[in-house]
Amino acid sequence: EEPKKEEAAKPAAAAGGISAKQVKEIRDKTGAGMMDCKKALGECNGDLEEAIVWLRKKGMASADKKASRIAAEGAIGAYIHAGSRLGVIVEVNCETDFVARGDRFKELVADLAMQVAACPDIEYVSPDDVDPAMVEAERAVQMKMEDMLSKPENIREKIVQGRLDKMVNEKALIKQDFIKDTTKTVEEIIKEATAEIGEKISVRRFVKYNLGEGMEKREEDFAAEVEAQTKALAEKAAAKKEEPKKEEAAKPAAAAGGISAKQVK
């Protein structure tokens, strides 16, 4: 019985030995509530890294439970990059106006707008938003590629599916590494915020503006332009030289034309 009592006493001893400094440290790193931080440290015998993992798992579980809720409130955030050549507008939803006005939610919206600006290849929010017709068209192309033809049919399908999944994920916002902490994805950051705030949070849509995108721009070859200008100047100079010669040639004709029959006689 004594070993059992000792084992049972360990978590309690660990929890009792948790300092306010440890709680603050883990809270600063995770953004979780004070009691949750203390509980995580107790469950993990005071191990900081294990406690962070425990909180992330707990946070994600909580977020998944909230995924079916309706989030119709929220905010629209914007980000203009230095130089004003790139701009982003993003809509992030939550469940209540109270949360939408909070600093934590506003910070998340600002971070997500900056994230969109930092990812030039993204085209949609989630892999679920991809056009199925585009995926099937790409699948057909991949299946007929030269490196696939020598492989068995079932192997080809698995390889191609892997390539398609990679391609789709690379263009999805929530699958990107978070710019402020590349050990996490945007999806994980949203789930952690959902667990911390206590409401469902989701990105509905975004739009990017690149200065001059879609406009037809005049493409100029500087060397060709200089050559054309030089040629035009040379032609103009040559034309000016020809004019005096024409005038000289015209004088004798004019003089001959002005002699009368009387003068000749």
Image (cartoon, rainbow, N blue to C red):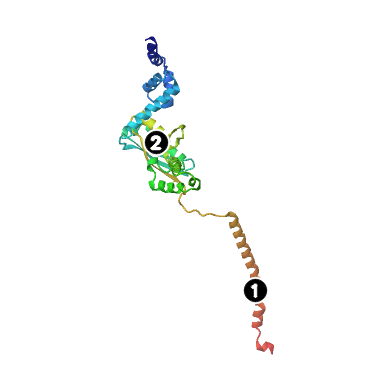
Q: Separation of disc 2 and disc 1 at Cα?
A: 80 Å
Residue sticking out furthest to the bottom: 265
Which secondary structure, mark 2? helix
Kindly report which numbered mark, 2 or 1, lies closer to the viewer in this rendering: 2
The residue nearer to you, when weighing 175 against 103, is 175
Q: How many marks?
A: 2
Residue 203 in the image: state x and y as whole percent.
37, 38
**Which quarter shows the N terminus?**
top left
| Mark 2, residue position | 109
Q: Amino acid at mark 1?
A: Glu
Mark 2: which amino acid? Val
Q: Position of residue 11 (x, y in %)?
A: 39, 16
Residue at (66, 88) in percent of width and height: 261
Q: Nearer the viewer, residue 38 or 5?
A: 5
- Image quarter of the C terminus: bottom right
Location of mark 1 (residue): 247
Quarter holding residue 112: top left
Q: Is residue 257 visible?
A: yes
